[in-house]
Image (cartoon, rainbow, N blue to C red):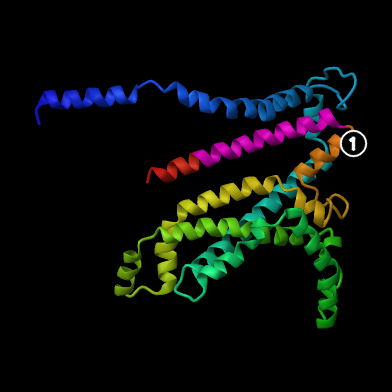
Amino acid sequence: MSTSTIVTAGDTAARRSTRRVEPIYYLFLLPSLVLFTLAITVPGIIGIFFSFTDSIGIGEWSFNGLTNYIALFSDPAILQSYLFTFGFSVATVIVVNVVAFLLAVGLTARIRFKTGLRAIFVIPMVISGIIIAYVFNFLFSNSVPTAAGALGIPFLETSLLANPDFAWVAIVIVTAWQAIPGTLLIYIAGLLSIPGDVYEAADLDGASKTQQLLRITLPLVAGYVVINVILGFKGFLNAYDIIVGLTNGGPGTSTRSIAMTIIAGFNGGDYAYQMANATIFFIVAVLISVLQLSLTRGRNQF
């Protein structure tokens, strides 16, 4: 290949990379951009503005600077909601990913009726969270104590939802029950993307199923694990409907999430104070998103 041909090819590639974006793309982008701005960006900016005031949501207001933000860091109710939300999110992420991965391994193995089983396991994903919460509320408050009494299990004879030390366990169970199907589908996609030749070669080398799982499957789906962990953690930070249906933040305030605290403040006249709380929560979510981008970018480089 001559030098002139190489130069011409390089010039063509450069012209393609700097080619002007067609105006029709902006035309299609404009409606979504306008709706997003009006529904998300503008209300968010207004909310951040009022977080520096003493507004109760209506009527007159005045600026109070960083008073709301300073008060947040010394408010035990706010600190408790953050502690519960992050602890609950970490515990649920672990449960969801472990169970979903093991189910995915089983549902991609050579078993009968695996297509039908996949359909059954994803059913919880399409049911409303509040409906699931009310059903499990009945089970934890009536069915489980009755069964525990018949089986002689004193610990479960009273509802977990009424126990301030273990109510969070019931919330983790119910949240995981609904979240596992979505995580399961992602893991199934990851497992199906692994070439079968890899496992055939491992069989020829005498590797056991456990060794294949730990040394082949897990490393090859590590990217899917990262995605599921981060998406799950971000989603569980916004937990609201299931907690409302199960405990409504109780007993006391032991299971009140950040979202519940913010909404309760809006309804109780603490608009500006909870807007400051929402702003801090937004910053936390942004930091987690930045972490997600950095982790996925690093994963794509390998």
Across and down, in percent, residue 167 comes to 80, 59
Look at 57% across and 62% down and name the residue there. 100
Q: Secondary structure at mark 1?
A: loop
- For label 1, the residue is 268
Question: Magenta region: which residues?
Answer: 270-293
Tell me which residue sits at (49%, 76%) in the image.
Answer: 112
In front here: 60 or 62? 60
In the picture, the quarter occupied by the N terminus is top left
Residue at the spot x=54%, y=40% of the render? 291
Q: Is residue 127 magenta?
A: no
Q: Measured along the vertical axis of the image, is residue 227 above or below residue 42?
A: below
For image coordinates 77% across by 54% down, the residue present is 130
Q: Residues within 10 Å of mark 1 (few under 14, many from 20)?
A: few
Q: Position of residue 206 (x, y in %)?
A: 33, 75
Q: Nearer the viewer, residue 117 or 228?
A: 117
**In the rendered image of this protein, does residue 27 appear above or below residue 120?**
above
Q: Decide if residue 237 is on the left or right side of residue 203.
A: right
Q: Percent x, y for residue 133?
A: 77, 58
The amino acid marked with disc number 1 is Gly
Question: For this view, does 108 lie left or right of residue 237?
Answer: left
- State whether the magenta stretch is mostly helix, strand or loop: helix
Let me know if residue 217 appears in the view.
yes
Q: Quadrant of residue 131?
A: bottom right
- The image shows a total of numbered marks equal to 1
Task: Mark yes or no: residue 168 visible.
Answer: no
Give yes or no for residue 283 being in the magenta stretch. yes
